[in-house]
Amino acid sequence: MAASALGWALRAARQVLPSPCTRQVRSYYVDWRMLRDVKRRKLAYEYADERLRINAIRKNAILPKELQEVADKEIADLPRDSCPVRIRNRCVLTSRPRGVKRRWRLSRIVFRHFADHAQMSGIQRAMW
Amino acid sequence: EKDESVASKDSTTEEASKRQEGTAETPKQKLLDIIGNMKVEVSYRKKLQQLKTREIKKQATDNLEGPDSEGTMLQRTTEQIQRGKPLNPELVEAASAVASSLPLNKKQTVSELLAQLRRHEETTDKQKKGGIVNIRNVISEMAVKRQSPAQRGVRISNRIFLDLDEDGQNIKPGRLSPQSFDSRRSLKVGRRLNIFTKASTETENALKTVSSPTIWDLEFAKEIAAITAQPPRNGFEEMIQWTKEGILWEFPVDNEAGMEDDAEFHEHIFLEKHLEDFPKQGPIRHFMELVICGLSKNPYLSVKQKIEHIEWFQKYFEEKKELLQGI
């Protein structure tokens, strides 16, 4: 049931996140761009091994060049969203593409908001 | 008489020597306890040793009757300890100096002193680690003498139970023992009344042959679980719930949680046996050997994943065989 809803998200960004917890769960992604980023991450995870192996054949001085050209074509044939370069580390709460701190996965504005309300553990205003 | 005076003199001189060594090392209170303990032990041991060496059997049997088991226990422990860790050289020198000052057989006294020191160190180590007191072991091995039934009350008080209460202290059950004693007697003694029939094993087997749970059973079980799962009353219960769900790790943190790699190290490193299907010569072999070298250094993959990696390459090269032969 949850899997089918996941597969075919025709409605507005609604994804039934398959989790057994009974608390309040966010059932929408923030915007479509975030959804696309999620898709790219999933595909990149699936094809990661294959890409690694084909690249190992390509970036080689030992194997014959014809083989490497064939490998080039093969990796180009893989779906475009499977390459990890297209992933953008967006803010988790606002989907902001810029100004995101990696450790907290939050944009600078959200981070500041939470830190000022003392909801970030171990974060304090700098003063020296 | 003469023996006892000599024994007491020896004990005092030994005490003095030990005191000199002790103050250099241990705090005062511990020292006083040790000296208090040592006084009794040393005099007993010395007495027994002397009696044995002079072969005065009558006196030996008379004197050994009381602390009989204790004495043998002490001797046994000293023998065991002599194989233990080496003593402080200063202590050894002090022991030899003391022995030389005494009138008796010097080698024997030195060995006895060293044995005593070793035993003392062992007991302090045990106490530091919080081990069981030696006295308990000694007492538990002591045999209880059989007395007449008229002296039953005395017998109960002599029996020392090893039940520990919260503090780890010995409970001497003055009040409880008569009751437990009576109940113990009444349980085992007497004819069988044949009131209860023995539980048959058939019912147990019948329970095991239940069919696999139906959907309705599963739903029922889920319903019960949902109803009985009360919201957490406090932060601790919340954390317990989170740990069960997998949101929170188990503490102390186990670095290998979820990683169940039962393979030995040699299965990770020596991967050449998977290379049998590849040609022996040529660039492909060279390439695969490099791949294997890289995999053997990878601590993050499991053995299965590494084998899959190699098999993928094998499949790939087989598909490209015609192409390769054209080259």
Image (cartoon, rainbow, N blue to C red):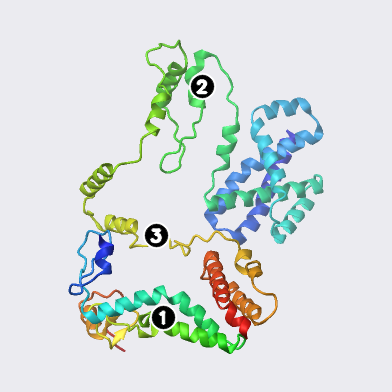
Question: Quick check: do tags 1 and 2 share a chain?
Answer: no
The reply to whether dot 3 and dot 2 touch (C-beta < 8 Å) is no
The mark lying in front, picked from 1 and 3, is 1
Which chain's residue wears label 1? A
- Residue B265 in sight in this render: yes
> Quick one: quadrant of the C terminus of chain B?
bottom right
| Disc 1 secondary structure class | loop
In front: B185, or A118? A118
| Disc 3 secondary structure class | loop
Residue at 46%, 79% in the rendered image: A51
Residue at 65%, 78% in the rendered image: B285
**Residue designated by label 3:** B250
| Side (left or right) of A54 relative to B226 | right
Which chain's residue wears label 2? B
> What x and y, as percent, mark residue B244?
33, 55
Q: CA distance from mark 3 to mark 2?
A: 52 Å
**Residue designated by label 2:** B155
**Residue, far left:** A12
Determine crowd level at label 3: few under 14, some 14-19, many 20+ residues with C-alpha closer than 10 A. few
| Side (left or right) of B76 relative to A71 | right
**Residue designated by label 1:** A78
Quadrant of res A67: bottom right
In front: B267, or B60? B267
Q: In this picture, is B276 found above or below B43? A: below
Question: Quick check: do tags 1 and 3 share a chain?
Answer: no
> What x and y, as percent, mark residue A4?
26, 64
The mark lying in front, picked from 3 and 2, is 3
Amino acid type, mark 2: Arg
